[in-house]
Image (spheres, grey):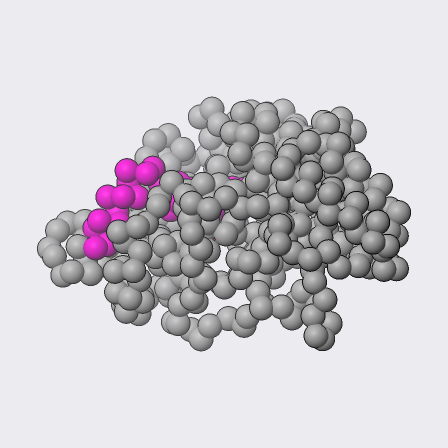
Amino acid sequence: ATPAPRAAKVPAARDDEDATAPPAPRAAPRSMAADEEDEPDAPDGAPRRTQELPAAAPVELGDPLQSIPPSFGPSPSKQLSEERQALFERVRASPIDPDGYRMLAEHFDTANDANRSSLMLELARALEGDPNAAPRTPRLILSATDRAGLRHPLVRTEAAELVTLTSPALCRLFPAKGRDAQANEEFSLESGKGAKVAADALLASVRLLGMRAPDVFVSDEAGPPFSALQTTPPRLVVSRLSVKKPMADAELRFYAGRALFTLSAELLALRTLKRDQLRAGLEAVGQMLRGQASTEARIIREALPARSHERLKALWPKVAKTLDLSALMEGARHSVNRAGLVVCGGIAPAIASLRAKKALPVEVTELVRFAASERYLQLRNRRLAKK
């Protein structure tokens, strides 16, 4: 039997603390790897519990109530702390204004905090549209905890856990259709002039995210360079245009990282199914849990491992009536964008890729907020340390 998917626990309260505000001092120093978000895996078959968040609440750029402790360098003066607080408020109020990040870069340079200064300067240049940004492939391999940290707070709720547990059944109920789902031309280095660059981008995503790649096929449909499909088994497709003509390495890595991360159990259904399909599928889950007989309920029952039923029965009465599919789908979109940024290795090409695909402004804003977060700063520091 297929094991039930498990949602790794990552405390939401610390997820989006921005890099502009170092974490408040604790009683005993400890690294990020020893924080609460590094809870060990649950025993086999035991679903991970996630912290419930208000799904409709916007994710702020850091915690506005967080105190302003000293940076890594010498303790700043009162004047420096007041200046820092004012700059924090500025970027939180206008998270895509490059001037605020440029001022923060100068501020942290004065405070002898080179890491944060460098990140703020990169953000400022990215928002201005840095034409010379061509980051190398990150030399970094994410752990399961790192991958869990890429998930947006909106998909770390008990409602999201319900969708995660039922994701294989939902995708079985509504398999992908169309030409891409039936495509039989396997992607290879001989697929075209751009095939090698596309293959390198996919391999970088597999290595960095620590996820296995499914079968990859060439798509004749118009769409992004890489897409994920909820077939059985799931597959990736690479666009014909991408294999015919080489694209910029960093942008390809962004799209490849997004597509591969979409295959996560927590995100697959939310990223590949339509809202009406998700709603109908979850109604079938409810029928199955109530013991009602229907074709859809039978498909759900056959696709779900028996060990997941107990947790589903506990979750259903708590979240079914208030489940916000729009918020979950939005959180899933922001999550794959975060993965794309990390695989891409640079903020400028990630933002350029979002703008090229005419992403909604909220996508760019949320990506910038994550790029300014303590979580991304730590990943960035690890990547730079390996050069």
Return the residue nearer the eye: 98 or 188: 98
- Residue 84: image location, x then y, percent: 77, 47
Does residue 158 appear left or right of residue 301 in this picture? Answer: right
- Please state, as top left, top right, bottom left or bottom right, where the N terminus lies in the image: bottom left
Does residue 314 appear left or right of residue 191 in this picture? Answer: left
- Measured along the vertical axis of the image, is residue 116 above or below residue 359? below
Looking at this view, name the residue that lies furthest to the left. 293
- Measured along the vertical axis of the image, is residue 140 above or below residue 236? below
Q: Residue at x 68, y 39 (%)?
A: 91
- Residue 99: image location, x then y, percent: 75, 32
Give yes or no for residue 95 being in the magenta stretch.
no
- Magenta segment's dominant SS is helix
Asked if residue 299 shows in the view, the reply is no
- Measured along the vertical axis of the image, is residue 166 above or below residue 46? above
- Measured along the vertical axis of the image, is residue 160 above or below residue 175? below
- Residue 197: image location, x then y, percent: 66, 35
- Residue 305: image location, x then y, percent: 30, 64
What span is in magenta? 258-286
Q: Residue at x 76, y 26 (%)?
A: 131
